[in-house]
Amino acid sequence: MKYKTVIVDDELEAQKRLLLHLKKFREVQLLDSCKNGKEALRTIKKERPDIVFMDIEMPEMNGIQVLANCPEPYPYFIFVTAYDQYAVEAFEQNAVDYILKPYTHERIAQALDRAIGMIEKDRLAEITGNLKDLVFSFSQGIDAHHNKEYLRRIAVKSIGHTIFLDVADIILIEAADQYVEVSTTGKKYTVRESMDKLERKLDPKAFFRTHRSYIVRLDQVIALENVDKHISLVTLKNNQKIKISNSRKPDFKLRMGT
């Protein structure tokens, strides 16, 4: 298996040196190299890497600030820097490792092994949790086809902690590449799940997929607006307007009792 990796360093020579080391690891899939913190945040949001090797002292936004402002789900950060005074703060922000320059190939390998170990441990925990839920369902005599239990909570995982969202608090779910963004009142979370897979887990009496990119909670809907013959919008209680496909509109109206 390959782990998507990004390098962040404002010094070109430092980027090249780290790149040469990482190219020697078969399990690393190098995505991009960034020269500052703002570029790193854009790349992380777009590419969703597994691992980020990042310098700390950079113009405009330093490495600690990048980690603190990183969108969920967080990648696994490894700091590579000439400064040791940030180590405590880095680990408080849940960094995987902290490498001081100049470093050796063996030190990079050690940090990479640690990051991969944490990734696999988290993935195994997720799989184990899913299996436990399945075993519990069968032990209770639940028929998955005729008496299906739907999600009551969604786990939002990041390094070092997991947040559990009550499904009843969800307002909107939006597609974001291979992830979804789940909106509650005043907060948005990124979840490692596809729209299709998550839709199957939600109670169809409570949620409706208005468009390939949107799932709304029905009790949050206050209006349906026909903009023209091609475009219709659903308005939510928070005044957000969401597209609804023409092909889904008849079923939506039926569900809303109109």
Image (cartoon, rainbow, N blue to C red):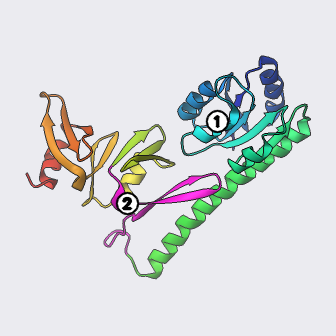
Residue assigned mark 1: 65
Residue name at image x 60 percent, y 26 percent: 38
| Mark 2 or 1: the one toward you | 1
Residue numbers of the magenta segment: 143-171
The location of residue 75, given as percent across then percent down, is 63, 42
The location of residue 28, given as percent across then percent down, is 73, 37
Furthest toward the bottom, the residue is: 140
Locate residue 64 relative to residue 114 in the image: left or right. left
Locate residue 254 relative to residue 51 in the image: left or right. left
Of callouts 2 and 1, which one flags the residue occurring earlier in the amino acid sequence? Answer: 1
Query: Could you classify mark 1 by the number of other residues whose Cα lies within 10 Å: few (under 14), some (14-19), or many (20 or more)?
Result: some
Amino acid identity at mark 1: Gln
The location of residue 88, given as percent across then percent down, is 77, 47
Locate residue 51 relative to residue 255 in the image: left or right. right
The answer to which of 97 and 134 lies nearer the viewer is 97
Inspect the magenta stretch and tell me whether residue 176 lies in it.
Answer: no
Query: Could one spot residue 26 in this view of the protein?
Result: no
The location of residue 172, given as percent across then percent down, is 33, 47
Residue assigned mark 2: 167
The answer to which of 232 and 249 lies nearer the viewer is 232
Inspect the magenta stretch and tell me whether residue 148 lies in it.
Answer: yes
Residue name at image x 75 percent, y 28 percent: 57
When the figure is inspected, residue 204 is found, relative to residue 225, above or below; the finding is below
Q: Quadrant of residue 125?
A: bottom right
In three-dimensional space, the C-alpha distance between marks 2 and 1, rounded to whole angstroms, equals 31 Å
Query: Could one spot residue 32 in this view of the protein?
Result: yes
Residue name at image x 68 percent, y 51 percent: 119
